[in-house]
Image (tube, grey):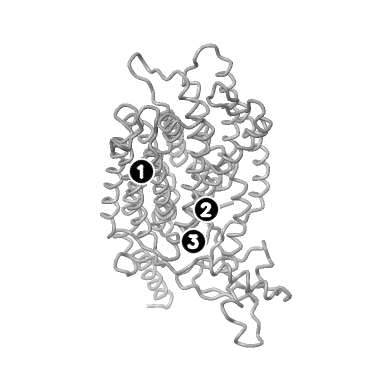
Amino acid sequence: MTKHHQHLGLSFRHGAEEERWVDDSSVDHRGRPPLRAATGSWKAAMFIILIEFSERLSYFGIATSLMIYLTKVLHQDMKVAAENSNYWMSVTTLMPLLGGFLADAYLGRFRTVLYSTVVYLLGLVLLAVAQLTPGLRPAGGSVPRIHETLFFVGIYLVSVGTGGHKPALESFGGDQFDDGHAGERLQKMSYFNWWNCALCSGVLLGVTVVVYVQERVGWGAATVLLAAVMGCSLVVYLAGWRTYRYRVPQGSPLTPLLRVVVAAVRKRRLRLPADIGDLHEEDGGKKRLLCHTEQLRCLDKAAIVEYDGEGRRGAWRLATLTQVEETKLVVSMVPIWVATLPFGITTAQVSTFFVKQGSVMDRRMGPHFVLPPASIFALAAVAMIATVALYDKVLEPCLRRMTGTERGLSVLRRIGIGMALAVVAMAVAAVVERRRLHSAATMSVFWLVPQFALMGVADGFALVGLQEYFYDQVPDSMRSLGIGLYLSVIGAGSFLSGLVIAAADHVSSHGGRRPGWFGKDLSRSRLDLFYWLLAAVSAVNLGFYVLVAARYSYKQTVKAKRVSASDVECATAVAA
């Protein structure tokens, strides 16, 4: 047998071994390298997608009716209720930053989901107790203090549960696909699309079936239903434990980033070498190595090798090129995160003022059925499901053939399209609200279809794009935290929405001396002017986003296992 044939035989056996075993630092339930045919991929992801469906059912069953509950049951003014609702959504979507950190650093993603689901269930139980116990329920116009206390403790326990559940579960699902395997890499792109279809299906039932139970049977009965569904989903999640691929937590993912900054500051007076091959790099083993980029060259100094003593090669004195590039990735995300905050502000209006608009419009559907106000949110969910399905099955394959790239449409372009649609949605909402204010007769709720549908399509582009961006572009060791960063866009947007409402009310009312944009009810408010304000701010911000996105450099990984920094062969992870 010739050497050529021997080489081909070895290559074939090596390829067969790579096809059989997963070599991406994940392990199976026994702590061994996972067998590709028995673990991960869609067989594991389906368990994870199912529990996401039930969690979103529970969350939106609460979130979309929260404004109604605060105003009708707790008798809060519209402005106070909107602020409380925005603050709760802010906490709920900012908590994943903490939950994602704990999942990546210490608990692991599987256990984080498990523990947070238990906390989530405890919050639902407290809500049910407050709503079903005779001595605790509101009677007439009086609301017992204990009811209000239990209610807010319950919904904030749901926030804490969501804080661990959301980042860990979504990134755990992404871990089931091997980035080094071409087939599974394409499956992962579809995973985020179908994840959002399941999410929106849960939203759809949450704002229709659950809201119907709240309206016709009672708030307590609906909460018991949500708790039962959440309990069943926990059983489903545990049933798939043998098929999952797990990542062992490696400690704080922020420590290596801080070491790079410290090392770069210490060596700030050194001159960068002309050849990047002189920068320090190590064989990553199973860890993916990253290519050198030209941005933030000042951080490259952390990888300069000093030859005047072994003591200068400590972890806080010398970093690898991959660690430097990981730090650059995180720093480069800050402008993108800031530029997407106005989109988070617009999404906050869908479950607050959009729903409140629907509550004062004609919701009759035939002689015997009246549409619950929160169920109007289903329009946005349906639009998002349709958008994601069409994008995955029609638009993306066509764009792949047209551009010749693996993705078709870059993730930042996808986000930008969604942000542009949100500007249009705010303008449409302003026009509809002005017509409602000047209409002599009560307008049909179906006048809200365009603004809900536009926001649903915008979410189908921007929210899915944000998920992919923050999951894929962060270092591999902090992917749960990456999902937390995505959710923090929505959380910070909700928080900023509350601040914008307060500021707009103060300015428009001249410090409370005259009626402002936000009265005690919608008939004495000027939501149309508020929507125009959001449309203007979002339009200006879209220009800023385009400038930031145009300068962004995507993560690039090294193809070879053992390389030197001077002759790396790079593969762009995300097509520009």
Q: Is residue 76 left or right of residue 334?
A: left
What element does badge 3 sit on?
helix
Q: Is residue 344 visible?
A: yes
Which residue is labeled 3 in the image?
A: 478
Q: Position of residue 39 (x, y in %)?
A: 31, 59
Seen from the viewer's position, the closer of residues 54 and 14 is 54
Seen from the viewer's position, the closer of residues 327 and 396 is 327
Which residue is labeled 2 in the image?
A: 485
Residue at image coords 36%, 70%? 13
Q: Is residue 576 left or right of residue 53?
A: right
In the rendered image, the vertical position of residue 496 relative to residue 574, given as above or below: above
Task: Say the numbered circle drawn on residue 53.
Answer: 1
Q: Position of residue 312 (x, y in %)?
A: 62, 83
Seen from the viewer's position, the closer of residues 277 and 204 is 204
What crowding class fits label 1: few (fewer than 14 Cα within 10 Å), some (14-19), or many (20 or more)? many
The residue type indicated by label 1 comes to Phe
Residue at image coords 61%, 50%? 336
